Image: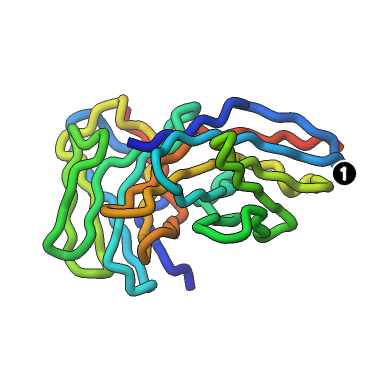
Amino acid sequence: DADVTQTPRNRITKTGKRIMLECSQTKGHDRMYWYRQDPGLGLRLIYYSFDVKDINKGEISDGYSVSRQAQAKFSLSLESAIPNQTALYFCATSDWETQYFGPGTRLLVL
Amino acid sequence: AQSVTQPDIHITVSEGASLELRCNYSYGATPYLFWYVQSPGQGLQLLLKYFSGDTLVQGIKGFEAEFKRSQSSFNLRKPSVHWSDAAEYFCAVGTSGGSYIPTFGRGTSLIVHP
């Protein structure tokens, strides 16, 4: 089984809808991250969490929120989706220096 | 703050040819350096990493990278490319102290011709 799983893998939604992307990990790591990937822009950090009680904004947090329900679970929400949030979203975990990525969620906002 | 530059957006090589992907970083102290590969439709997989010690690092799939402090570079190499190496490659730099949040380059897309 994969160490980092993301659900759903693909999602189409409409402008203004609320959507949640979920991430689970079995690596036992305290640190978890959400990134978005856009062509030509690489990976940009949305939010990160160093433990269950710690949530921090990344470089592009506007329009997003997160919830760390447990050490193993970290969810990303788009409260009111807009078309420029169409992207590939990755969850990652890390022990300290090295990150491990999930397979990604491809989101299309119409 | 640290930064990473991957100067080449696309690289095209013939199968069997050698490969070098460039990565330059900016960071005041000794960085942690990584190369990740993203195959089409997949997540990012760690190829190799450098923290300290030997500046020539061996990774998976026959890749290696060399840390050159004087040039602020961490270029990825492979002596003979296979068609399955076609993918997006990302270089990343992390800080050696404090909160660890890596910064990623924009990626280099590798195209392999038969």
Q: How is the image coloured?
A: rainbow
User: Which residue sits at x=56%, y=42%?
Assistant: B69
Residue type at mark 1: give it.
Gly
Q: Quick one: B53 or A96, which is closer to the camera?
A: B53
* Residue at horizontal 38 percent and vertical 72 percent from the top: A27
Q: Is residue A10 visible?
A: no
Where does residue B109 sit, x and y in percent of width and height? Answer: 63, 33
| Quadrant hosting residue A11 | top left
Q: Which element is circle 1 on?
A: loop
* Foreground residue among B23 and A7: B23
**Farthest residue, direction front:** B70
Which residue is depicted at the point 28% across and 51% down? A21
Which residue is located at x 18 percent, y 31 percent? A16
Q: Position of residue A76 (x, y in %)?
A: 24, 49
Q: Is residue A53 left or right of residue B28?
A: left
Task: Tell me if residue A31 can be seen.
Answer: yes
Q: Chain of mark 1?
A: B
- Screen quadrant of the N terminus of chain B: top left
Residue density around tag 1, few if under 14, some if 14–19, many if 20 or more, within 10 Å? some
Please state the horizontal and vertical placement of residue B43, each as a whole percent of the image. Answer: 50, 51
Q: Which residue is mark 1?
A: B16
